[in-house]
Image: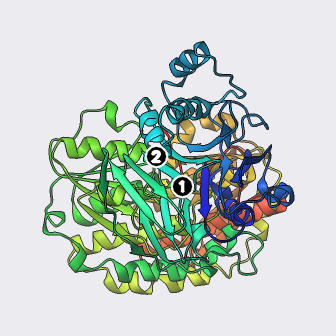
Amino acid sequence: MCGIIGYTGKKNAAPILVEGLKKLEYRGYDSFGIATADGAISVIKKEGRISNHAGNAGTLKGTRGIGHTRWATHGIPNDKNAHPHTDCTNRIALVHNGIIENYAELKRELIKRGHVFRSDTDTEAIVHLVEEEYAKQHDLPEAVRAAVSRLKGSYALLVLASDEETIVAARMASPLVLGIGDAETFIASDITPMLEYTERVIFLDDGDIAAVTRDDVSIYHNCERVERPVELIDWSVEDGKKGGFAHYMVKEIYEQPQVFYNTIRGTDDASLPDYYRMKDPITIVACGSSYHAGMVFKYLLEECCQVPARLDYASEFRYYPSPASGLVIGITQSGETADTLVALRLAKAHNCHTLAITNVLGSTVTRLADTTFYMRAGPEISVAATKSFIAQLAVLMQIINKFCGNNHSDTLLDAHTAIEEVLLMDISETVALCENARSIFYVGRGPFYPVALEGALKMKEISYIHAEGYAAGELKHGPFALLSDKTPVIALCMPGETYDVMISNIKEMKARGSPVIAIGRNGDTNLPEICDVFIPLPGANIFTQILTATVVLQLIAYHTAETLGRDIDRPRNLAKSVTVE
């Protein structure tokens, strides 16, 4: 859950590393650092964000270097725990994403052998292991190979030595991608820092060790030289910029009509293997927003197709009996979510078919799953998922459409126009009710229950207001005790079999003094009479209603956080890609 970058080429490395770390800051922003080699190793690292301290870091000299932006695991965010870490001789520098599970044992061994530790991190044990091995044979790739053979856990490593032209990269359960330029090579956690320099990339596999120079890349696996394919990336530089918006999050919200349309068009019959058409049990594994998308899918699949579905948090999947057959779907925006990868590996071990839904070409999940469906979302920079969630729904709704004989094709192809309508709505009354709240409840029934969960997640992530999503009937089983005039309720009340009971639930909440914001279908005459604020949505189809309700809740969260002056794209304590279990 950190961002790492390396560069070797003809240019001064430091400015490229600084700009690259700014693009990776969504992966972690507790502290940052860079190291360059120019006859000696020079390091600058500090607590805080690189966007606030970039000036000094960009002055280091040398045409090769490594950088890091941190999301803390071992050791609090401060200067000494920031990466890069150096060995006792200050001739080797190293950055790391991941967690080393046996670092305490390694640290004790290394201290006994005379090594001096200057941080509280697990990472520092690695650089001292490399130091020992490098002293034996003066071969940096071989020293890294020997060092990582001692590690238990996950890692993406970049290693720089003062007297070596080579940067060494190593990967295990944490992403690393190489960018191939013109007499320059980039290495990073993802492709965003490379977009303005190259469209040619190589994705490393678990267990790979790469020796990287400006003109050559040599990749080894189990001590054997291997070739990994060069792939072309179709994301543009502009995709990674704000484009005049105040925040990435609102830019990405406004990109959703096109993202949904592109993803619907990109998920077709030809990409749906025969065994996905069978009505065998389906299991969905995911985390966070992806889990909420999976829950929407479960409701719709069982209602529309009569196909049974099981939904598990990926982090809990291993603790329940694994499915004996059928299809296991793993949903992960980054394709690197550690818990989801573990769950899919377990499913494959039980001979289940596996399907991945992801946004990132070449990510780990694409090589693990039997089949991959890609979201057409482009790079999502804001930590809070918006367009990736809509793209996940697009893939999942298209799968349902295929199960149902394409009965919903016209609805799905036109749904982006309803999303466009929602983006023009005035929600200022709702924001006024939410901005001073201590807690907000989100309620819904059926497939609108997971939409409520997702709305609450967005609000708590970026506004820091406590928010909880509930199935509407559950509030009276305890949470009613928290209702008051300072506790707004956002109720999703759409036509259908749950409509009448939702009206009753809303009246119960109003009777406890809570202001109620109702989201319903345009033309509803009941909700305006019983609620404080009514938000009418276009669309008569349940697919469209789910999409438009989701977008409204994203906008409510965004504008509430904006009013409160929050750091919307980089909420405290969170990182975009959760690559540790």
Q: Is residue 564 visible?
A: no
Is 574 left, or right, of 183 in this rendering? right
Q: Name the spot of residue 227 as percent of width and height, x first.
A: 31, 62
- Quadrant assignment, res 204: bottom left
Gap in angstroms between the C-alphas marked 1 and 2: 8 Å
User: Crowdedness of circle 1 by 10 Å Cα count: few (<14), some, many (20+)?
Assistant: many
Residue under pointer 2: 141
Count the marks: 2
As rendered, which of 204 and 357 lies closer to the eye? Answer: 204
Rendered image: mark on residue 404: none
Across and down, in percent, residue 107 comes to: 57, 21
Taking 105 as reference, is 280 above or below it?
A: below
What amino acid is found at the position of numbered circle 1 in the picture? Thr
Q: Amino acid at mark 2?
A: Pro
At x 64%, y 21%, the residue is 115
Which disc is residue 166 wearing? 1
Does 134 appear above or below 459? above
Q: Are marks 1 and 2 in contact (CB under 8 Å)?
A: yes
Q: Secondary structure at mark 1?
A: loop
> Between residues 538 and 175, which one lies in front from this camera angle?
175
Asked whether residue 187 is in view, the answer is: yes
* Quarter location, residue 367: bottom left
